[in-house]
Amino acid sequence: MYLELARHVATDTSTKSEYLGRIVPLSYEMSALLKAMEEQIAALSGNIVSEEAFLSRTEKQRMRINQIEEELSDMPLAPYECNDIDEVLQRLVANLGNIALFYSEQGRKNWARSSQRAFLVSQQLAAARASLRDLEYEVGKVR
C-alpha cells in the first residue's frame, strides 16, 4: 500500500502557510476554551455552582471542542516541517476532548463519582495547559 499512501500524502497535504493559517486561529480559540472550562470547573469543584449549572454553562464550550475534533480530522495532512506542531495539536485536542467527554451524558454514567471525575479532569487540565505551551513553542519554531 506504499504507492497509495504516497499518492494520498502527495495530494492531501497542506502547505506550511495553509496549515498555520488554520492552526494558529484554532490555537487561540482552544486557549480561550481551556480558560473558560478551567474557570467553570473551579466553580464546580469549589461548590460555587451545581453540576447542572456547570453543564448548562459549559454546553457551548463542550460542543465546540467536539466540533474542533471533527474539523481537525477533516483537514489535509500537515506539511513535513509542521509535524511536531501537529503532534502537539492532536494531544491538546485529545486533552480538551477528554474533559468534554467526562461531562457528557455517557461520561457522567461511566465516572459517576464526582470525586473520581474531578481527579481525572484535573489531570487533563494540567496536560492541556502543558500541550498549549508546547504548541506555542512549536509554532514559534516554524514561523
Image (cartoon, rainbow, N blue to C red):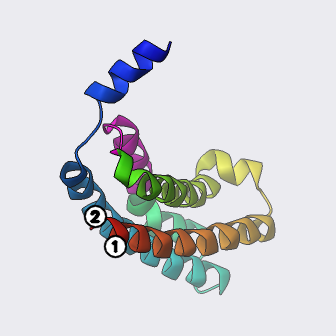
Q: Residue at x 61, y 48 (%)?
A: 105
Dominant SS of magenta comes to helix
What residue type is disc 2 on? Val
Q: Which mark is residue 1?
A: none
Q: Give residue 123's position: percent from left, percent from top.
A: 69, 70
* Badge 1 or badge 2: first in the primary sequence: 2
Disc 2 is placed on an element classified as helix
Rendering quarter of residue 142? bottom left
Report the front residue among 124 and 37: 124
Give the distance between the C-alpha atoms of the residues marked 1 and 2, in whole angstroms.
11 Å
Q: Which mark is residue 140?
A: 1
Q: Residue at x 47, y 71 (%)?
A: 132
Q: Is residue 64 magenta?
A: yes
What residue type is disc 1 on? Gly
Q: Residues within 10 Å of mark 1 (few under 14, many from 20)?
A: few
Rendering quarter of residue 28? bottom left
Disc 1 is placed on an element classified as helix
Magenta part of the chain: 63-79
Q: Quadrant of the C terminus?
A: bottom left
In-image side of 28 versus 100 (left or right): left
Q: Give residue 65's position: percent from left, percent from top.
A: 43, 55
Q: Which mark is residue 24?
A: 2
Q: Residue at x 39, y 66 (%)?
A: 30
